[in-house]
């Protein structure tokens, strides 16, 4: 029997509705795998209606695995909010890339199509530098055309900063519906959240649990304990994310954790303030992701932090 839990929802700037909690499908190993299919099936049975996957060219792409789960479920397609992403190798072939993704997923449309990163790769996997074509503005112009096809109900970006969004918005006809970024109490992105909120862009958090690298912090633990013995540290972090107006896409293979992650608690003002300030503790303000490089004085996939608009130093630590 399927779970009847109703997840909180956000309205996008095009009027479409997106569940606030989604199931992330990159589960720590590259590419397609049956464990991804099993996780998505379980998530849908538990009440998840937002599934977040990755474009077909990516080494972490898992659209075929997600597609197998979508084919097995009895839940109507219209009730599932499906997100996938344009890979960096595909910035020059946007429509072709989406068509391939749709074929792998076995669906006629996605609810949200994201430009995964602002930088593009060429056919030789060389990172194109800002100003080299296709720029992310040129790629966005091609993504805008997808809306008329009905193959993408909404379009957005991922890993964009205030700096790169400002460049994009100056030339965009369509304002991105979503900006998906790393987001948790150690990297709260307060300025980016305010910037996006003012422009009707929903911020979505990947790595919302910080890969459990700081979840045992005394502040988080005390908040969980204050809400009863059944409250998990993950529930505190996810509730903070949704309560401040961001969507969250946690991931887990464990059915009990999937179930727990879908249930939020109500945090009071002092608890929200404590979590908003957690990053100010010594050594806490940092990324938890492994894609950072110390080359070029601090970079990610060939762009420096300055080019990305990230206030970082080498190793992903905030200035």
Image (cartoon, rainbow, N blue to C red):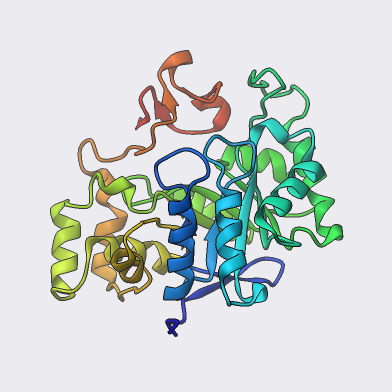
Q: Residue at x 53, y 74 (%)?
A: 9
- In percent of width and height, residue 57 lies at 64, 36
Q: Is residue 251 left or right of 140 when viewed as pictured?
A: left
Q: Nearer the viewer, residue 9 or 79?
A: 79
Q: Is residue 296 above or below residue 100?
A: above
Please report the residue visible at 73 percent of the width from the left and 23 percent of the height from the top: 131
Viewer-proximal residue, 276 or 30?
30
Q: Going by the image, does 101 lie left or right of 66?
A: right
- Compared with 55, 77 (above or below) is below
Viewport quadrant of the C terminus: top left
Picture quarter containing residue 11?
A: bottom right
For the image shown, how many numbered marks are present on the structure? 0
Q: Position of residue 93 (x, y in %)?
A: 79, 36
* Above or below: residue 12 compared with residue 138: below
Quadrant of residue 240 within the rendered picture: bottom left
Farthest top residue in view: 296
Question: Does residue 130 appear in this view?
Answer: yes
Closest to the observer, 227 or 167? 227
Q: Residue at x 29, y 68 (%)?
A: 256
Residue 239 percent location from the top left of the image: 34, 67
Residue 141 in view, yes or no: no
Looking at the rendered image, the quarter that the N terminus falls into is: bottom left
Residue shown at 56% from the left, 21% from the top: 302
User: Image check: 31 left or right of 215?
Assistant: right
């Amino acid at each position: 029997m399927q779970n009847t839990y109703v997840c909180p929802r956000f309205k996008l700037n095009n009027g479409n509705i997106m569940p606030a909690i989604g199931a992330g499908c990159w589960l720590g190993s590259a590419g397609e795998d049956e464990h991804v299919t099993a996780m998505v099936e379980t998530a849908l049975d538990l009440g998840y209606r937002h599934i977040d996957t990755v474009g077909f060219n990516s080494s972490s792409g898992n659209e075929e695995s997600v597609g197998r789960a979508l084919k097995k479920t009895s839940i109507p397609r219209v009730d599932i909010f499906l997100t996938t992403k344009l890979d960096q190798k595909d910035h020059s072939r946007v429509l072709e890339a989406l068509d391939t993704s749709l074929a792998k997923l076995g669906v006629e449309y996605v609810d949200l199509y994201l430009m995964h990163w602002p930088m593009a790769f060429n056919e030789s996997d060389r990172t194109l530098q800002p100003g080299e074509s296709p720029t992310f503005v040129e790629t966005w112009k091609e993504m805008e055309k997808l809306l008329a096809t009905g193959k993408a109900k909404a379009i957005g970006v991922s890993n964009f900063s205030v700096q790169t969004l400002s460049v994009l918005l100056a030339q965009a006809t369509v304002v991105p519906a979503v900006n998906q970024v790393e987001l948790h109490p150690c990297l709260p992105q307060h300025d980016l959240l305010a910037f996006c909120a003012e422009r009707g862009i929903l911020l979505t958090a990947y790595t919302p649990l910080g890969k459990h690298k700081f979840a045992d912090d005394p502040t988080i633990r005390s908040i969980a304990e204050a809400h009863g013995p059944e409250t998990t540290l993950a529930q505190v972090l996810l509730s903070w994310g949704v309560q401040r107006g961001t969507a969250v896409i946690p991931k887990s293979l464990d059915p009990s954790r999937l179930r727990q992650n879908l249930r939020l608690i109500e945090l009071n003002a002092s608890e929200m303030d404590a979590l908003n300030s957690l990053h100010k503790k010594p050594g806490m303000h940092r990324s938890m992701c492994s894609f950072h490089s110390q080359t070029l004085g601090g970079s990610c996939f060939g762009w420096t932090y300055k080019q990305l608009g990230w206030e970082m130093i080498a190793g992903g630590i905030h200035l």
